[in-house]
Image: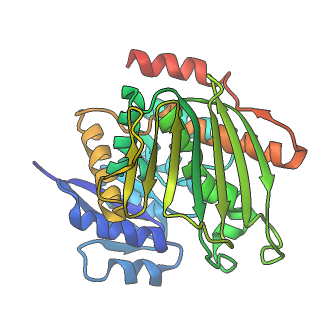
Amino acid sequence: MTPLRFGLVGAGAIARSYLDAFAEATDVCLDGIADVDLDRAQELAAGTSARAYDDHRSLIAEGALDALIVCAPPNVHADIAIDALAAGIHVLCEKPLTLGAFTAKRMIAAAEDARRLLTMASKFRFVDDLIEARRLIGSGAIGTPLRIENTFMAPADMRARWNADPTRSGGGVLIDNGTHSVDILRFLMGPLRQVHAVDTSVGERYAQCEDSAALFVRNASDALGVIELSWSLPAGTDAYVHVVGTNGEISVAWQNSRHRLDGAKTFSTYGTGYKKIAAFAAQIENFARAIRGEGKPAVSLLDALASVEAIDAAYISMHHNVWTTVGTRSFDQLERRERIA
């Protein structure tokens, strides 16, 4: 099988994880890396067969690519993705998909017009322990889910990174880590109906954005999701997802996941923990199979748009201190199209 040719836009920290993932993934190859800082692109490409470019348009024009991975700052995701789609290239875009639902819909329309795939990166959907948690919930092994908790908290100085510049990132920890959170909860509990977000920042380290936040969500059956996010505070637990049901519970952890099923009194361990590069490699392979017509992307257009809508609603909630409905009117036609496809 001829490997699919991928390009990569952005040569920052996340791009290095993709570089490691390409070394593990099968039937794909990385042919080009673009960054506005050519030195960074060249440094990342060193030791690989990929060529370095200082502009994504040059990579698109010269790379003869099948697919492009976008891991530049979110404020430029849409322009890069739309340029690639118009050139007939499939796009895997890092989270958040973009800044705001209006722009997300432009990206989706561009993909549909070009008849090319567009998906949002969501590495946790490819973590085996989380996949098993979803299966167990769906099987009824913990009864009816009552509460799902997600914790992404760890001291990390983001002040010199674009993540803490709202003009480039769209906000602070809420859009950065929180995009993973809302997609995980959607993965486990279905579409999110309402959100309530609170800025819980712990100081003045970040003058332009929130460094900590709490987010509460409800799904269609009123199950509660609780999300805690921080760049400043430690988590105090190894579990980043905890699900409590009427007849058991599941803790998905960085190292040792565990569950208590079917009314059991004690926990049993399961899985192998969080394997970052393996998750990235599985994500690339899933996208490659979809390009070849061997299935669909794990993150659908509906999923990607839903994540943007949820974060939009969360910021409205944070600023107005109210429960906010997650936009759904835009989903109806898209959901029907995906079911037909």
Q: Is residue 314 left or right of residue 3?
A: right
Query: Is residue 38 shown above or below 231?
Result: below
Inspect this view and state whether residue 90 appears: no
Residue at image coords 38%, 81%: 42
Q: Is residue 16 left or right of residue 219?
A: left
Q: Is residue 57 left or right of residue 199?
A: left
Residue at image coords 39%, 49%: 267
Inspect this view and state whether residue 281 appears: yes
Q: Residue furthest left?
A: 1
Which x, y percent locates residue 35?
49, 72
Which x, y percent locates residue 255?
38, 64
Q: Residue furthest front?
A: 265
> Quick one: 69 or 185, which is closer to the camera?
185
> Quick one: 173 or 113, which is closer to the camera?
173
Query: Is residue 43 shown above or below 189?
Result: below
The colour style of the image is rainbow
Which quadrant would the C terminus be assigned to in this image?
A: top left
Which x, y percent locates residue 254?
42, 62
Query: Is residue 21 shown above or below 330?
Result: below
Number of numbered markers:
0
Looking at the rendering, which quadrant does residue 131 occupy? top left
Residue at image coords 70%, 69%: 164
Q: Residue furthest right?
A: 320
Residue at image coords 35%, 34%: 135
Which x, y percent locates residue 261?
38, 37
Q: Is residue 85 left or right of residue 176?
A: left
> Quick one: 248 or 76, which is closer to the camera?
248
